[in-house]
Amino acid sequence: EVQLVESGGGLVEPGGSLRLSCVASGINMRNFGMSWVRQAPGKGLEWVSDITNGGETIYYADSVKGRFTVSSDSAKNSLYVDMKSLRAEDTAVYYCATLALSEVARFDHWGQGTLLIVSS
Amino acid sequence: DVQMTQDPSTLSASVGDRVTITCRASQFISLHLNWYQQRPGKAPKLLISGINSLQTGVPPRFSGSGSGIDFTLTISGLQPEDFASYYCQQSFLYPRTFGQGTKVEIK
């Protein structure tokens, strides 16, 4: 069974930094693409970033480009997002998800999410 | 960016009803269309990929159809556990984009 567990969320002041983590079990992250998707309180889903298996290619939404850096550690089977210059509009639940790339790319397994609040 | 527009935003229905949610893309996305279900307070769950491929374990009352730019999610015989929000999502082009969501409420 695939399990994804996010952590690292919390309250950060505007302009601050934070790292979110996602630990995977039941899969070898070397063989999977991974993604971050976020959801502001009471709002819809917003794609944030994809990292292909092996971390060779990383894509970002324009809203986070230059401020967020996604990485993975295959030895720890973990995915990370380093966030800086945080803004109020970054407040959201952040989900990590596996990214299946066969045929049609899709987010096929999701973690439970971790909440980031950016506020003074 | 490819804009995904769902209709309706909210839908009131009763157990046993057949409900249809539509999703329109702002440009051609071929078959790169997925549907997700999100129950309150829970993570999204992939229901259907590639327009009409039901994921393992998803009940057959869920079905997807469409092509090009217009797509539909149908629930035939709504069950209590189906009251949730539903999102379409395109993977044809970056950035990946979601519809704004459709909330299915109890009438």
Image (cartoon, coloured by chain):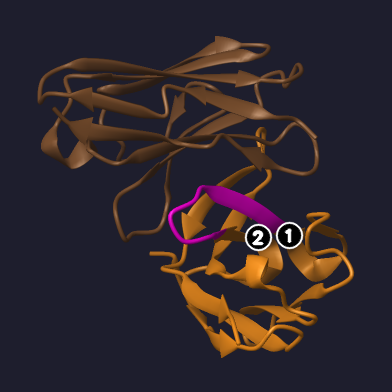
Chain colours: A orange, B brown
Rendering coords of residue A60 (x, y %):
81, 58
Taking the image as drawn, is residue A21 in sight? yes
Of the 4 image quadrants, the one containing the C terminus of chain A is bottom right
Amino acid at dot 1: Ser
Q: Residues within 10 Å of mark 2 (few under 14, many from 20)?
A: many
Horizontal side of residue B53 vs A101, given as left or right: left
Cα separation between marks 1 and 2: 5 Å
Q: Is residue B56 visible in this depiction of the protein?
A: no
A35 relative position to B1: left or right? left
* Quadrant in which the N terminus of chain A appears: bottom left
Q: Is residue A87 left or right of residue B46?
A: right
- Return the mark for residue A49: 1
Question: Disc 2 marks which amino acid?
Answer: Ser
Residue A66 is one of the magenta-drawn residues: no
Percent across and percent down for residue A15 are 76, 85
Picture layout, residue B24 above or below residue A120: above
In terms of image quadrants, where is residue A91?
A: bottom right
The quarter of the displayed image where residue B57 is located: top left
Contact flag, marks 1 and 2 (Cβ < 8 Å): yes
Viewer-closest of A36 and A100: A36
Q: Which residues are magenta?
A: A39-48
Q: Is A47 part of what is drawn in magenta?
A: yes
Q: Report helix, strand or loop for mark 1.
A: strand
The subunit letter for the residue under badge 1 reads: A
Q: Residue at x 75, y 62 (%)?
A: A53
User: Which is more toward the observer, B29 or B49?
Assistant: B29
Of pointers 1 and 2, the one earlier in the residue sequence: 2
Residue at position x 49%, y 75% from top?
A115
In this picture, is A48 found above or below B77? below
Residue that mark 2 sits on: A35
